[in-house]
Amino acid sequence: MAEGAQEIRRFSVQAREVDSHHARVVEEASFEAAAVAYAEDFAMVVDDSLELSIIVRDLADGREHCFRIDLETGETASCG
């Protein structure tokens, strides 16, 4: 692997506010990158909120992280 290159991993990603059948598989280098990639393509309007909570699960080991994304500024933070 080239220096500085990150391994691409497979994640299951879904918005917390919608049913799990709206999850999709995303291939990215990190949990954060997977959350942002999902948010960029998210077309559903959940409510009048400008925040979206996204759950990201690593398909290889099952670890999960949750992120809040401010849809107006693009800032990402942990749900916790």
Image (tube, rainbow, N blue to C red):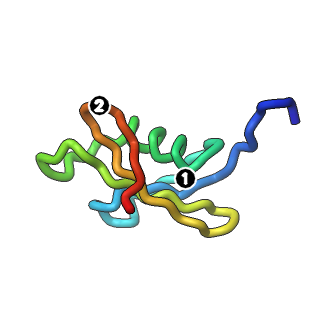
Q: Is residue 58 above or below residue 51?
A: below
Q: Position of residue 58 (x, y in %)?
A: 61, 60
Instruction: Please give the name of the residue rendered at 36% of the width and 37% of the height, measured from the top-left corner.
Output: 75
Badge 2: residue crowd in 10 Å (few <14, some 14–19, many ≥20)? few
Q: Furthest residue to the left?
A: 48
Q: As shown in the figure, which amino acid type bears the numbered disc 1?
A: Val
Q: Is residue 12 toward the left or the right of residue 19 in the image?
A: right
- Image location of residue 21, percent across then percent down: 39, 64
Q: Quadrant of residue 19?
A: bottom left
Q: Which residue is mark 1?
A: 25
Q: Amino acid at mark 2?
A: Thr
Q: Nearer the viewer, residue 33 or 44?
A: 33
Of the 4 image quadrants, the one containing the C terminus is: bottom left
Residue 17: image location, x then y, percent:
27, 61
Q: Earlier in the sequence, mark 2 or mark 1?
A: 1
- Give the residue number, with chain letter if any, for mark 2: 73
**Going 39% across and 48% down the picture, which residue do you hit?**
77
Quarter of the N terminus within the rendering? top right
Q: Dot 1: few (<14), some (14–19), or many (≥20) neighbours within 10 Å?
A: some
Residue 71's quadrant in the figure? top left
